[in-house]
Image (spheres, rainbow, N blue to C red):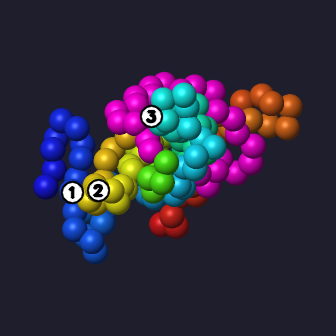
Amino acid sequence: MQESSSHIVASPAGAHRSGLPQDKELVLRVIPMPADVNANGDIFGGWVMAQVDLAGSVLPARHMGGRFATVAVNQFVFKQPVKVGDLLSFYAHIERIGNTSITVQVEVWAERQRPQYQCVKVTEATLTYVAIDEQGRPRPVPRPAAPPA
């Protein structure tokens, strides 16, 4: 069962993939621990942001062929709090490949076991990474070779 407004998917054991993005690649999974909580007892937003940056960098790392840097967080939305013990799954897809940059969209889903299994979309973000040379200057993103004719 899915509630469109809050992005909560309830699923019985064994059906964990329903509700999770099918059009994005799973790039990272992590379980936040008690050391990552803020004063309210939820996971600190800065910790989630750092994980999103790591997850978002996976796809550019495959395409850039060398050094690159995060240059922009174009959008970042916290939809639900993250709790200690949530299994966070980070899904990403490339939104745009430019001359020197790649823009990636990342969704973060929390699988919660208590009191019953729920899969909740907790965060979504769009980040831009730029290919850089050894001096830190932008360089072209390598293009895949054209298939032989």
**Identity of the residue furthest to the right in this view:** 135
**Measured along the vertical axis of the image, is residue 62 above or below residue 135?**
below
Badge nearest the viewer, 3 or 1: 1
Query: Can residue 60 be seen here?
Result: no
Residue designated by label 2? 115
x 44%, y 44%: residue: 83
First reached walking from the N terminus: tag 3 or tag 1: 1
Residue designated by label 1? 10
Q: How far across and how far down the image is residue 77, in percent?
A: 40, 29
Residues drawn in magenta = 58-83
State the residue in front, 39 or 69.
Answer: 39
x 29%, y 56%: residue: 115
Is 61 covered by the magenta stretch? Answer: yes
* Mark 2–mark 3 CB contact (< 8 Å): no
Q: How far across and how far down the image is residue 32, in percent?
A: 54, 49
Judge left or right: residue 35 versus residue 21: right
* Mark 1–mark 2 CB contact (< 8 Å): no
Is 116 covered by the magenta stretch? Answer: no
Residue 72, by quadrant, is top right
Q: Amino acid at mark 3?
A: Ala
Residue designated by label 3? 125
Judge left or right: residue 80 versus residue 49: left
Q: Amino acid at mark 1?
A: Ala
Badge nearest the viewer, 2 or 3: 2
- Label 1 sits on a secondary structure element that is strand
Judge left or right: residue 82 versus residue 134: left
State the residue in front, 132 or 142.
Answer: 132
Q: CA distance from mark 3 to mark 1?
A: 23 Å
- For label 3, the crowd category at 10 Å Cα-Cα, with few meaning under 14, some 14 to 19 and many 20 or more, is many
x 70%, y 39%: residue: 68
Query: Can residue 77 be seen here?
Result: yes
**Measured along the vertical axis of the image, is residue 62 above or below residue 108?**
below
